[in-house]
Structure formats: structure tokens, C-alpha cells
Amino acid sequence: MPPNRDESVETIQRELTAFARRARATAARMHPELSLVSFTLLAHLADQQGCRATDLAAHYLLDKSTVSRQVAALEKLGFVERRPDPDDQRVQVLHPTSLGYETLASVAASRRAVFRERLADWSQEDLARFAEYLERYGRTSVRPES
Amino acid sequence: MPPNRDESVETIQRELTAFARRARATAARMHPELSLVSFTLLAHLADQQGCRATDLAAHYLLDKSTVSRQVAALEKLGFVERRPDPDDQRVQVLHPTSLGYETLASVAASRRAVFRERLADWSQEDLARFAEYLERYGRTSVRPES
DNA sequence: CATTCACGTTGTACTATACAACCACCTGAA
DNA sequence: TTCAGGTGGTTGTATAGTACAACGTGAATG
């Protein structure tokens, strides 16, 4: 008998929750030099070719104080630099340094390797469908920001 | 053109990571009285009809000190009680109290409602497949414990 | 201009977590 | 039968990540 709607929802909920519980620790074990949060923020900076702290906070639903400290840590590690915004003296535009780009690339590669291995025995079709479902889920669970 | 293997793996990685980043905060907003971790531990106790702290630690890959404190908090809130193990005086078998069961039920219901709404426009078939993929992923990413 | 708003930092507090040291108990081998 | 080493659990200490509140400084607008 196929599972009913509620059973499927229950499973999705349980598995996602379990994943969330493990994610941080796993990430920390994988690459101690860049936590999950730092990695994500740095990746966003690289992706956006730089942005403001406020943008990071809005995008990730974090308090600005949290972002401020995370960015300070990234700067201290030499992964991020701040550039003044000529149009607004309050603003500091954040950019990855070249060290930041390098570290990001290496961490991203090792993360990719772990995921790839973990998914090694999945068929191409299953991978594509799983990816599609996750994207769809992600779109519905995050409210869009400007 | 269908995505290739690497693109799918990349997407899965990105979406799961994004989810992990949001999960705790979301859970905390949903039901402040029971954090994601507490909820999970309590749910496991209910599911197992009671178990030892060590079992919880092994199952969730948490340090026993972490479990000890979480359990202490749950006990303080009146959600969990400790029963002596007649066969081994070191052991305290943990059980949800009736208040624990009630709270768990109510939190689970509200979580279920959120998830159900979020997944409302998914077809039954897609839900079932998504659930199956998540379970499969979960099995491969956690090393099995006895 | 004066008020209000936006950006960012800092002080404070809390939660989740790990590791190490410890105590109490259990178990098996000399 | 005793004791050495293992197991279950707690507590001390430290760290990361987070939020909220208060603040300073600069921008924008009535």
C-alpha cells in the first residue's frame, strides 16, 4: 500500500529535521576553518561580487549583530575585506579576499566530494528528481526577499 | 537538456545546506517551549517507550554531557521522568510524563500543520517520492549504530 | 534644520555543543 | 573475592552562534 499524504509529510518533516540537527556538526568536522554559517556568508559574497552586511542579514534572516560578528571573524581570518561605499559613508561593501576565494574553493570542493560520495549509488534520474524536489521545497519555505 | 550528475549533486547540497541554516530558527519561532533538539529527544523517548541517556547520545551522535543537560532541562520542565533500572543501578530509564506526551502531541501537531500547508500543492505521488528520497539520503549519511 | 531612519558595532544573555575530569556502579579475570 | 578497567551519568569549563537592546554616526525628508 502506498503511504498516505500524512505519512509522507511526517517522513519529510522527520528527515529534514534530522538532517538539520546533524548539519552543523558535520560541516564543522569536515572543515574546521570555516563553519557552515561562515561558509555560507562567504559564498554569498563571492556569488554577489560583494554586498553589504545588511543584505546578508536580510538574505539569511539573521540579526545584523550576528552578521557583524561573523563578518568580523571572517575579516580577522583574512577571508573578507571591507571597501567604503562612495555613495554612503555608513556602508562597507564586503568582498572576499583572494585568500577568501581560495579557501572557499577548497572547502566547496571538499564538501562537493563528500556529497558526491554519499550520493554515489543513486541513479542519474533519482538525483535529478531529488534535486528538483528540494528546490521546490526551498522555494515554498522561504519567503522571498526583495 | 536534463541536468548532469554534478549539477544535481550541487543543487542537493545547496538546498540541504540552506535548509539546515534555517531549521533551528524556524523551529524556535514555531514553538518556543520546545527547541528542535528537545523536541527530537522527547519524541524519541515517546517512540521508544523510554530509553537511557546513553542511547539518546548514540542515536543522535551527541555527547553524553549534552544529552545529560538536555534531559535535565526536559525534566525541569516536567516533560520527562527518570525511572531506576532494576538491573543496573547506574541507569535511569527516561520516560515522557503525561505532560510530556501532551506537549509533544501539541507541538507535533503544529509542526505537522506548518509542513502540511507548505506541501499543500504537492501531488501525492511527489510527496511520496520526496519522502522516499529523504529517507534514502538519511540512511546513507548516518553511520548505523547497533 | 530637526526629526526620523538606516547601517553598523558593542554589551549582554542564552542555547547548544564538546571535551575532560570525576563519581558511582558493574563485570570479568587473576 | 577482590580489584582493574569499562560504562552510565553529572559537572566544570570553553566555544560558537544567535538575539535583543542601546548606541553612534551618517543620510534623508518633512
Image: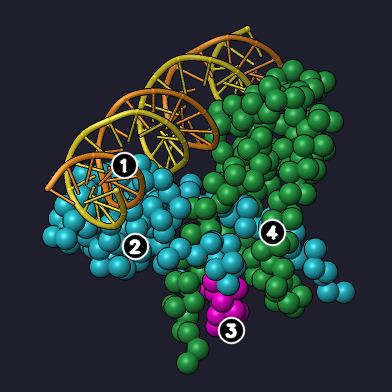
Chain colours: A green, B cyan, C yellow, D orange
Magenta span includes B126: yes
Chain of residue at mark 4: A
Percent position (x, y) of residue A44?
73, 42
What residue is rendered at 31% in x and 68% in y?
B47
The image shows residue A44, relative to residue A8, as above or below, that is above
Q: Magenta part of the protein: which range?
A: B120-135
The image shows residue B122, relative to residue B13, as above or below, that is below
Q: Main secondary structure of the magenta part?
A: helix
Element marked by disc 1: helix
Which label number is shown at residue B44?
2
Q: Which residue is mark 4?
A: A115
Asked whether the beta carbons under mark 3 and mark 4 sit within 8 Å of each other, the answer is no
Cα–Cα gap, marks 1 and 2: 16 Å
Q: Counting residues from the N terminus, which is met first, the one under dot 3 or under dot 1?
A: 1
Percent position (x, y) of residue A88?
76, 21
Q: Nearer the viewer, residue B81 or B102?
A: B81
Q: Are marks 3 and 1 on the same chain?
A: yes
What residue is rendered at 77% in x and 49% in y?
A109
Q: Counting residues from the N terminus, which is met first, the one under dot 1 or under dot 2?
A: 2
Percent position (x, y) of residue C28?
29, 57
Q: Which residue is mark 3?
A: B125
Q: Amino acid at mark 1?
A: Arg
